[in-house]
Amino acid sequence: MISQNPFSRLMQFVRPHRTSYILSIVLAVSGVACGLVPYFAAAGMVNLLIGGNRIYSVYVMWCMAALGAFILKAVLMGLSTHASHKATFAVLSEIRRSLAAKLTRVSMGFLTDTPSGKLKNTMVERVEQMEVPLAHIIPEMTANLLVPVAIVIYLFTLDWRMALVSLITIPIGMLCYMAQMKEYPKKYGAVVQAGKHMSAATVEYINGIEVIKAFNQSAASYSKFTNAVRQNADLILDWMKSTQGYSALMMTIWPAVLIGVLPAGCLLYMGGGLQAPTFITVTILSLGIVGPLVAAIFLTDELSKISTIVGEIGAVMDEPDMERPAQKKEIGNIDIRLDNVKFAYKDTQVLSGVNLSIRQGTTTALVGPSGSGKSTIAKLIASYWDVDSGSISIGGVDVKELPAEQVMDLIGYVSQDNFLFNKSVRDNIRMGRPEASDSEVEAVAKASGCHEFVMSLEHGYETIVGGSGGHLSGGERQRIAIARAMMKDAPIVILDEATSYTDPENEAVIQEAVSRLTRGKTLIVIAHRLSTITNADQIAVVDCGQISAAGTHKELLEKSTLYAQMWKAHSQVKDMDEGGGYNV
């Protein structure tokens, strides 16, 4: 895939709002032009004084013109800023929505490899940093360049020699600016990367605070976090040190136009080659050239930031989509079939030729040692990833030939890492079917064994569950996640160790509820307690990335050595639990 130029990519978002930006530019140019009227007024009044004009009303008129232009400049610049900000916030909104939509189209591998703090930093902080460049560069830089150019042209019509002298500090200042910018993109890029790393480390630190406290650690001793913060600070200081000297020198030289204008003007005037009115006009107007140019130069600093930020956004946008057609297809049934499925995660081969058939309306359990590939099979069926080779079909149609939305409509997925949004219990369950009524939400909650504990909460169904469901226990989060999946009423339900946090008593209740709610559906279960899947229509034993055996519980005890060993180990643990072997 060929990556787009950062500014070409940005223009895709800016183009729909170009009318507002053009209006902002016109208003900004007019505003800056009005800001130069006082210079013309001052030159005019000084020339009148030297000429001996004693008509007071003429000077009042010039003062009123300057005051009016000053007020008009404030009004025009305010209107320009309003127009540019209105367009800019719309652009930022579209960029964030595009990023969010992109994340739904990429594989879970990309999302797993990318720290959530890094993605959050890109979508929130980095996009927000584009507000100043977008809202101000387009109108203000245009105006701050056009108006001084117009003044310079006017000065050349008055006296080309004085016009050249008035520009003498600009190339010297530009040399300082070029020296400042020599290492700027590289060092600013390093600052950006360090900021992303610090953001990711901060999110990890906050999420792992319970473990950190449990092992008597602290922010100071948690080296990954402290090193990230220190590196970020060091790089920012290094970046500032490398630019501040040149910046200070540049800001000293550029405004010093009178160093050249006054001596040269005096020599020409004394030699009779320059008239006094022209000398005065050039002297005063030359003071109005540098201010807008300096403002424009400082905005180029923001251009470097835009390039870096858009490049970062582009890295996400250029991530390949999972290829899916847009048109839905008719499928006769929802039988699931895996044919010689192979899949590698990074450089590790996870599945190496999985073959499995799951009939519609049956319950299939995936069991096997940790890391054998059970969850990977479930995620591949749900199209969280694409297979490297082989195929997965639903109703005889390869899932790659089905739109992602159609596959998602067919499957309800509940994992062991149940994520709840920082909303009410009711809203979290209702996400399974947004149009569901309150009574339907409560009916599903009752059927899934949630209602009793939900009603014991302080605000019942309106209780806010906290970030990631942090106000609830692991078992409570799982039961709400199961209720949410049941609310979706998908014909295929995948439970990926969905009851791992549930105690045996509640697990029995939930298993009964799941059996009732998934009656007639295709159920795929990854269970950590073998006793809960003994009645499954089919149990597939996953070992080293392959299906080593498949059959009923009774059949596997006879023909699968691995399953028999797992069942024996499970039974011993179960007996110890029931006998109080682990109680103190």
Image (cartoon, grey):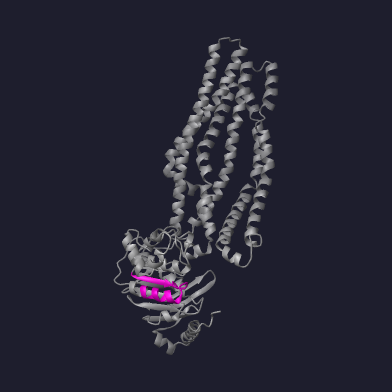
Q: Position of residue 494 (x, y in %)?
A: 40, 71
Query: 157 or 70: which is nearer to us?
Result: 70
Query: 485 or 358: which is nearer to us?
Result: 485
Q: Position of residue 503 (x, y in %)?
A: 46, 74
86 shown above or below 72: below
Query: 259 or 465: which is nearer to us?
Result: 465
Tally the marks.
0
Q: Residue furthest bottom?
A: 558
Residue 275 seen from this side: no
Query: 309 or 528: which is nearer to us?
Result: 528
Q: Is residue 241 magenta?
A: no
Picture residue at 45% right of the left edge, 42% below the top = 87
Q: Position of residue 208 (x, y in %)?
A: 57, 64
Q: Can you say which quadrant of the picture contains the C terminus?
A: bottom right
Residue 452 seen from this side: yes
312 shown above or below 171: below
In the shown orientation, is residue 520 left or right of residue 278?
left
350 shown above or below 578: above
Q: Is residue 494 magenta?
A: yes
Q: Position of residue 502 (x, y in %)?
A: 45, 73
Range covered by the magenta-colored residues: 491-513
Quadrant assignment, res 148: top right
